[in-house]
Image (tube, helix red, strand yellow):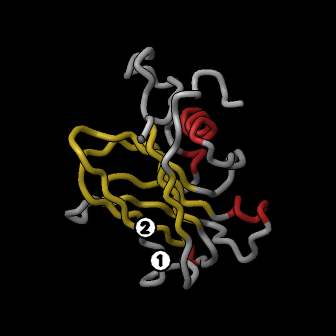
Amino acid sequence: MPAPGLAQYQHLRFSWDGQPAPGTGGNILIPGFVISGSGAEQLLVRGDGPSLAAFGVSGVLAAPSLKVFDNTGSSIASNTGWGTASNPAQIAATAALVGAFALPSGSADCAQIVSLPAGAYTMQISGTGETTGVALAEVYEVEVPQAQPANDPERPVAVRLSR
């Protein structure tokens, strides 16, 4: 049974992991995504490394760094260690609501909530301190429920129906 208040929602998730394993220099993970339509979309973007070990993945990227770029090549968001973001409680609540696995508190995994207008974007996941390993890039579409004020920093988020 879905969580209360989520019955009318489903989530859209893009995940990709590729070879060679992300690292530094030219050996980084660079998936892209496109937001169509008009207006802005709120997204949860993640670069998972250390937490993948709990799922039996070996050789994980121990210290990932996440950057999001727009179609001009401008860096518009970045994170190294999701718990160091300005809103870790909101990131954790959002991840739970969209069905993403929980990132351990204090892990070096990366996550950021961003609001982006329609357009083309890329994410870069690389290793900090010359680290290399297996990583997972994730993008989740999320939306603020109408009942909550948009400026409430601790607001719960839910996934927009995408039928």
Q: CA distance from mark 2 to mark 1?
A: 7 Å
Asked if the residue at tag 1 contacts the one at tag 2, i.e. Cβ–Cβ closer than 8 Å, the answer is yes
**Residue 153 in picture, x, y percent from top left:** 46, 25
Instruction: Give the secondary structure at mark 2.
Output: strand
Q: Position of residue 51 (x, y in %)?
A: 70, 59
The residue shown at (72%, 48%) is 104
| Neighbour tally class for label 1: few under 14, some 14-19, many 20 plus, Cα within 10 Å | many
Image quadrant where residue 88 sits: top right
Label 2 vs 1, first from the N-terminus: 1
Q: Between residues 134 and 23, which one lies in front from this camera angle?
A: 134
On-image quarter of the C terminus: top left
Q: Quadrant of the N terminus?
A: top right
Q: Which residue is mark 1?
A: 28
Q: How far from the left and from the top, in percent, is residue 159?
A: 49, 36
Q: Which amino acid, by three-letter code, is at mark 2? A: Gln
Residue type, mark 1 in image: Ile
**Where does the image place residue 123, in percent across and percent down from the top left?**
40, 63
Mark 2 — residue?
124
Residue 107 appears left or right of 79: right
